Amino acid sequence: MAYYITYGEFQQHMKDYFFRTGSRMQFPEMADYLYRKGLLSETPPDPMLTSEMFGDMDDDAFNKIIDQLPLELNPQISITPKVKETDIFPNSGDVFIIRHPRYTRPTPHIHNYFEINYVASGSCTFVFEKNKRTMQEGELCIIAPSSEHDLVIDDDSTVFCIMLRKSTFDTTFFSLLSRKDLLSYFFRTILQDDSHANYLLFFQKIISG
């Protein structure tokens, strides 16, 4: 049976638990915790969205919209280091986008789809096969399937995570693969051999005056 809570409430519980206990939970662990505490609803919340939601709004207003969106949770789902497309994507969906949860427990994992992380504000820690790097605001990282990685946010920074089916990229962006540049080489190599762990990082170049 599915249970519901708004994304903002879920994220606030993650933050409160961290500051209260000094410990972190993974997303499924927090879902179980809220279920045991009786803090989930059997009916989805009704977000108060307006026709201007895609208009000219600042980051704070946009994040408030995200906080109102309902989360559908299925408690007692086991945590696995191998995540499949069927665990993430709706049956008819090719792309899935979330605002990455904050204050989660570090858990390196792999999956069989592409993941694109964009730091909209603040910073985060990106881990690739045990190597750590701080990603700053404005930076973007494309993670290939079968790559062990993790992303940890220790504050209220905002990172958007775009997940894309491997098959969708292969068919939709086929023309990109024939070009002779680094981006085309990256995707061409990954699509030909999905056992090759890799990532591509686009970072901000700081120019001093």
Image (cartoon, grey):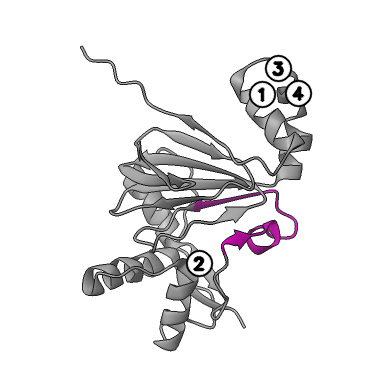
Is there CB contact under 8 Å for labels 4 and 2?
A: no
For the N terminus, give its image quadrant: bottom right
Mark 4 or 2, nearer chain start: 2
- From this viewpoint, is residue 16 visible? yes
Q: Which residue is mark 3?
A: 179
Disc 1, disc 2: CB below 8 Å? no
In the displayed structure, 115 sits above or below 209; it is: below
Residue 175: give its label: 4
Judged from the image, the secondary structure of the residue bearing numbered disc 2 is strand
Q: Earlier in the sequence, mark 3 or mark 2?
A: 2
**Tags 3 and 4 touching, CB below 8 Å:** yes
From the viewer's perspective, is the residue at label 1 or at label 4 nearer? 1
First in sequence: mark 1 or mark 4? Answer: 4
Residue in the foreground of this view, choosing between 67 and 145: 145
Distance Cα–Cα, label 1 vs label 4: 9 Å
Mark sitting earlier along the chain (3/1): 3
**Contact, mark 3 vs mark 1 (Cβ under 8 Å):** yes
Q: Is residue 18 above or below residue 118?
A: below
Q: Is residue 82 highlighted in magenta?
A: yes
Residue stretch rendered in magenta on the structure: 81-98
Name the residue tied to disc 2.
70
Residue, x 35% and y 21% (percent of image)? 205
Element type at mark 3:
loop
**Which amino acid, by three-letter code, is at mark 2?**
Pro
- Of tags 4 and 2, the one toward the viewer is 4
User: Which image quarter is the C terminus in?
Assistant: top left
